[in-house]
Amino acid sequence: MMAKKKKMKSLKGLSLQVIPFSEIHNLTIAQRVKKILNLILGNRIVILHGRLRPEEEARLIEDTMAMVDHVKGFTGIELAVIEPDLKEQTIFFKFRHGIAKRLVGNNSALTIVGPANVVKEIRRDPKKLELMLS
Amino acid sequence: MLKILKKFSMRVWRGIFSRRRDFKIGFYGPPNAGKTSLANRICKDWTGEEMGTVSNVPHETRRVQIKEEVNIKYKGKELQFKMIDTPGIATKIDYENFLKFGLKKGTAKKRAREATQGIIEAIQWLDDVDAVIVVLDSSQNPYSQVNITIIGNLVARKIPVLIVANKIDLKKSDVKKIERAFPEYEVVGISAKEGKHIDDFYESLYKLTKKI
């Protein structure tokens, strides 16, 4: 009974939030970043269907740093993006993927963002992604 | 065809009459990759003085440091530029990590606060540099999101990039891994600390400025 209680305690607080690309598609950079950071501050790991643009990723880091300074106990984020490997795909697939990307944005990728006090490290190599939790 | 001719004549015109001497070259990368060590090496080689302090404790550089004029005369070529050494970019800063290096709690908290400001400042400088040298620690995994974000931002802003795989003097160094991670870019392996392959770096630096 005690062991069960202990196990329950160690699992407490891990929460995942999936955001479909359609939910952020029409938001401005500031709104997208704010939405993600609000969830992160609620100790949630965000799985975003799609990928932020490079300037949005930079803005996310900037705003995160500003919050580290102002929010007690918040130490930052862990961030990783997984994208399909197009190297092995046919030219037709790459062409189709390129057109889709231009029309609806890069939603074939997955972006994972977690609070640094929950996600200790995201180990990434081209083929796999490992989330090391605290 | 017209466009090509126009571009060609512009290049010739620029080459003859308006040789730019005010390049701003930024040094970017994650913390502890050796940006300031490389900046110091260049400064010592060509100006005789160092640019900033280096340390094993991460986030030693917490303000953007500028060397207004660096003149390189090397193998008959000449290059003049402004050098911008930026704080290491990270997505998290925990003052407790600095305690492991023997810093007192107050000092560690101050360092963390300054480091967050430094990261913001470094990102803002991205809008104001003409070319960037991304310095990576060749003994570390290059597939970190910070590296990808930095390079992605440079590509989006059409800023020419040279990747320096630093710390080749370390046993775990793997320059090939960095080359595999960023196949579209020129990668030069060096040891800023020991001065290894620094000649190759200067050659690559000349090539980089030609892309501006």
Image: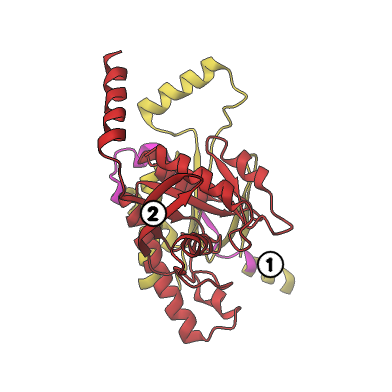
Chain B tint in image: red
| Residue that carries the numbered disc 1 in the rendered image | A7
Between residue A66 and residue B188, name the one nearer to us: B188
Question: Is A15 within the magenta?
Answer: yes
Q: Which of the marked residues, 2 or 1, is nearer the chain's N terminus?
A: 1
Quarter of the view holding residue A101: top left
Judge by depth and name the residue closer to the eye, B157 or A113: B157
Quadrant containing the N terminus of chain A in the rendered view: bottom right
- Single out the mark in the foreground, 2 or 1: 2
User: Quadrant location of the C terminus of chain A?
Assistant: bottom right
Q: Is residue A49 visible?
A: no
Q: On residue A60, which mark appears?
A: 2
Q: Which residues are magenta?
A: A10-30
In the rendered structure, which amino acid carries the disc numbered 1? Answer: Lys
Badge 2 amino acid: Leu
The hue in which chain A appears in the rendered picture of the protein: yellow
Does residue B130 show up magenta in the picture? no
Read off the chain for label 1. Answer: A
Alpha-carbon neighbours of circle 2 within 10 Å: few (<14), some, or many (≥20)? many
> Which chain contains the residue that carries disc 2?
A
